[in-house]
Amino acid sequence: MKLTGHNFIGFERSGNGKVHFQAKNPESQESLETIFFEATTKEIDQAVTKAEGAFLTYKSIKNNQRAAFLEAIGDELLALGDTLINRCKEETALPEARLNGERMRTVNQLKLFAGVVREGSWVDARIDTALPDRQPLPKPDVRQLQVPLGPVGIFGASNFPLAFSVAGGDTASALAAGCPVLVKAHPLHPGTSEMVGQAIINAAQKTGMPDGVFSLVQGTSVDVGMAMVNHPKITAIGFTGSFGGGKALWDAANKREVPIPVFAEMGSSNPVFILPGALSDRNDSIAAGMISSLNLGVGQFCTNPGLVITNVSEDSTHLIEKMKKLATESAAGTMLSAGIKSNYEKGATRLSANHSTELVATGRAGTSVNNAETRLYQTTGQNFIAHPELAEEVFGPTTLHIASEDKNEMLKIAENLEGHLTATIHGTEDDLKVYEDLIAILERKVGRLIFNGYPTGVEVCHSMVHGGPYPATTAPQSTSVGTAAIKRFARPVCYQDFPQTTLPEPIKDGNPLSIWRMVNGQLGKD
Ligand code: NAP
């Protein structure tokens, strides 16, 4: 596929902007071919207007047809073959195997949502039938279901050029809910984004979707994203990226004349608590697992294990010595951009500037300017509690070991944590009995608790929660991964005393879609 650098305003290509940009290979620093047109405010308005125009048609399309659209996007992504992977590799410096895996994850994610749409029960239909003879007042017939919000604006993420970008989880869940989508591509991979955007448009045309169901705008300036957030017809925002970016979008959305929800996943440092029994039983394997999780994707994952907490003991000393050795042997990897590398170094400076921490291991240096070295820092529990800023995410392969005095100090460390995406506990069953209160504390701090595993590697499934209390996200009641993500882009509406002929299918008598419904308090398919 030949790239043109244009935006997609619905099914039409458009490049009216005077501002142009090119992608850069993060490894060689060379500019890549194809000049991209930054979208103008007028083009963004045209895209949102088309999305609004497509909304009523798209939301009313039969479940099977909407599911076929999602599956067709997956087929189009696969049909792009190596062309997509090669361009993505040039734009991100991520290895081919990782990108092929990420594409399959994206395709499977689309298929999973297609299954949810086809099955249909996600609308959470509830019916309370009328009791006209009830005294002292008759009870009305009340029926509830989830309906799509309207056009949704989505920001592609830098660190997942496929699975959290143009056709990623946010887009898949919004389209599944019945919302037209406008994506602001991440400027680090505009070519990949254009190819994926074309794949979505091909799929939309092949499956009979309305023009405007999907648009893609490009740009390097924050004005493009802000124009999307501030457009009065946009009804919700999906975002994965930095705390600064997510918070700016959230604040802007709340200042609109009509505020809208922002589902921003802004990262976390994912504390890992290693309890005494596990330290004694699996010391070496935990050290190896920790460093491998830390280095995955050059540490550029929001689930990267950035904090490791153990109680002071001989076993703990052994674990840290082993982790130091493995960290020192770790090869440097190329980060996604000079900006991300520079933020990584600022994070290291921030940790080093705090006099209570010590840099105890540094990985091998690389040769490319955007190479990042693995780093292991250490501090005491007391210092960590006194300096809450030490818990801030350092995006990259850096982790801070916190040596706590005893169980009480460990619990205090946990209590002092802000919201994170995950917390991990390594322990034995006996450890869990002794540290029951640690689990209760952590449940209030995170979206996902992991036992004897590592936080990287987020399974895409029905039960996943990839979210958590602020500042990990701006919407702690939601998840951005897994099929429950669809709920972000819908809201409940209830119909009172409407005739059967007018009611939406999911809440009609006789259950024509054969979905799970709650009728007079009983869950069933009758
Ligand atoms: P970012 O700075 O948060 O940017 C992500 C997207 O949000 C970009 O499209 C960006 O638009 C937009 N954006 C950012 N600030 C904005 C603002 N004030 N107004 C409107 N739009 C705004 O993330 P990034 O570029 O991917 O990487 C920068 C840093 O984010 C990294 O160093 C890392 O610390 C962090 N990060 C964290 C995660 C995570 O999962 N926790 C993932 C990726 C990055 P423009 O590109 O047009 O500016």
Image (spheres, rainbow, N blue to C red):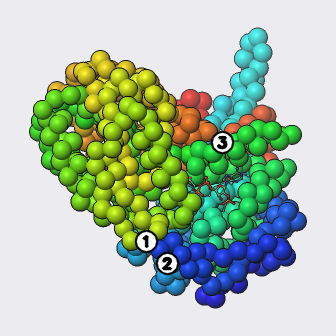
Contact, mark 1 vs mark 2 (Cβ under 8 Å): yes
Given this view, does label 3 or label 2 mark the residue nearer the observer? 2
Q: Is residue 411 left or right of residue 75?
A: left
Mark seen at residue 43: none
Contact, mark 1 vs mark 3 (Cβ under 8 Å): no
Amino acid marked by disc 3:
Lys
Q: Considering the image in quadrants, where does the N terminus appear?
A: bottom right
Q: Name which of mark 1 and mark 3 comes first in the sequence.
A: 3
Distance from the alpha carbon under mark 3 to that under mark 2: 32 Å
Amino acid marked by disc 1:
Ser
Q: Is residue 408 left or right of residue 91?
A: left
Nearest the eye: 328 or 222: 328
Q: Which residue is mark 1?
A: 368
Q: Residue at x 45, y 39 (%)?
A: 353
Mark 3: C-beta under 8 Å from nearest atom of ligand 1:
no
Specify few, some or many for label 1: CA neighbours under 10 Å numbering under 14, 14-19, or 20 or more: some
Q: Residue at x 51, y 49 (%)?
A: 346
Nearest the eye: 186 or 339: 339
Specify few, some or many for label 2: CA neighbours under 10 Å numbering under 14, 14-19, or 20 or more: few
Q: Residue at x 79, y 68 (%)?
A: 39
Q: Residue at x 74, y 12 (%)?
A: 135
Q: Name which of mark 1 and mark 2 comes first in the sequence.
A: 2
Q: Considering the image in quadrants, where does the C terminus appear?
A: top right
Distance from the alpha carbon under mark 1 to that under mark 2: 8 Å
Q: Which residue is mark 3?
A: 247
Q: Which residue is mark 2?
A: 28
Instruction: Tell me where residue 229 appears, x and y as whole percent.
Output: 76, 51
Instruction: Tell me where residue 516 appears, x and y as whole percent.
Output: 54, 45
Nearest the eye: 154 or 177: 154
SS at mark 1?
loop
